[in-house]
Amino acid sequence: MQGHGQAQPVQPPPSTGLLVFLRVLFVVISVCSFGLLGWVMMLRLALVTRKSLDWGLLVATFAAEALGLVLLGTEPGEEIHTPGGWTGLALLVGSLVPAISYYLAAEIRHFHAVGYAHQTYAVHQQAPAHTYGYPQPPYAATTGPHTPVPSSVPIPQAPSRPPSATPTPPPQRPAPARIDQVRAELDELSDYLRKHEDGR
């Protein structure tokens, strides 16, 4: 017993090449028989779709072709001379064109729907079994228990280091040799200025 949400198995449609071959075959049979075997393609359509409308059209097509054949049989000779003969020919040929048009349109539409249903079933079969036909929540891909965090709760951050904690390098003092050199130069300069003033 299948549970809710599981798609019913759908048989895949025949190949496109086989369907085209069968359509051409049944249309050629109907045309080459001048409508006498037009009911054959309608029988195939009714067997494929299993719709009451197609079964009714099969009966109507068969009745029209049988009546047309009977009217043609009432002709005294091989050529058509009477209104009954022309009516019979009109029934055979006239019913052929709409029958072919409806047969092709209905069969193509039917197998298109079957192919779509088969693709949908295949997609459902490929989905994980625990989904039961429902979309997965965004956190279903996680392997462990998951507690969603509301977006309004602020996330705590690590406290930043206060500015005073950053060590500042001590001020560089000039080397003693440099100080002595500067003093010597200042002494020489003062001696020069003193000699220059004394010379005046």
Image: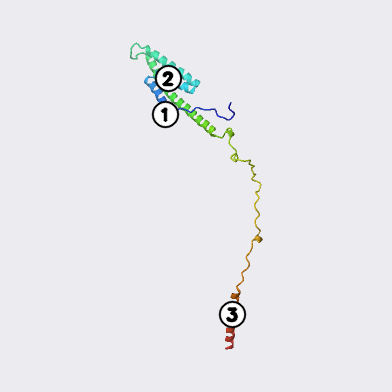
Q: Position of residue 49 (x, y in %)?
A: 48, 23
From the top left corner, tell me how far across and down residue 186 is, in percent: 59, 80
User: How far apart in space, not on screen, are marks 1 and 3 (Cα)?
Assistant: 111 Å
> Does residue 156 sit above or below 12 in this rendering?
below
Q: Say which quarter of the image contains residue 37.
A: top left
Question: Of discs 3 and 2, which sits in the foreground?
Answer: 3
Q: Is residue 119 left or right of residue 34?
A: right
Name the residue type under label 3.
Ala
Q: Which residue is mark 2?
A: 40
Pointer 3 or 2: first along the chain: 2
Give the labeled residue for mark 3: 184
Bin the neighbour count of mark 2 within 10 Å (Cα to Cα): few under 14, some 14-19, many 20 and up. Answer: some
> Residue type at mark 1?
Gly
Residue pictured at 42% horizontal, 19% vertical: 40
Q: Quadrant of the C terminus?
A: bottom right
The quarter of the picture where residue 74 lies is top left
Estimate the spatial distance between the alpha carbons at disc 3 and disc 2, rounded to whole Å. 129 Å
Image: 38 above or below 126: above
* The disc label shown at residue 73, or none: none
Q: Nearer the viewer, mark 1 or mark 3?
A: 3
Label 2 secondary element? helix
Percent coordinates x, y for residue 125 in the rendering: 54, 32
Q: CA distance from mark 2 to mark 1?
A: 20 Å
> Under tag 3, what secondary structure?
helix
| Front position in the image: 101 or 156 | 156
The disc, 2 or 1, on the residue closer to the chain's N-terminal end is 1
Q: Name the residue carrying label 1.
A: 17
Q: Say what amino acid the circle numbered 2 marks.
A: Val
Q: Position of residue 115 (x, y in %)?
A: 48, 29
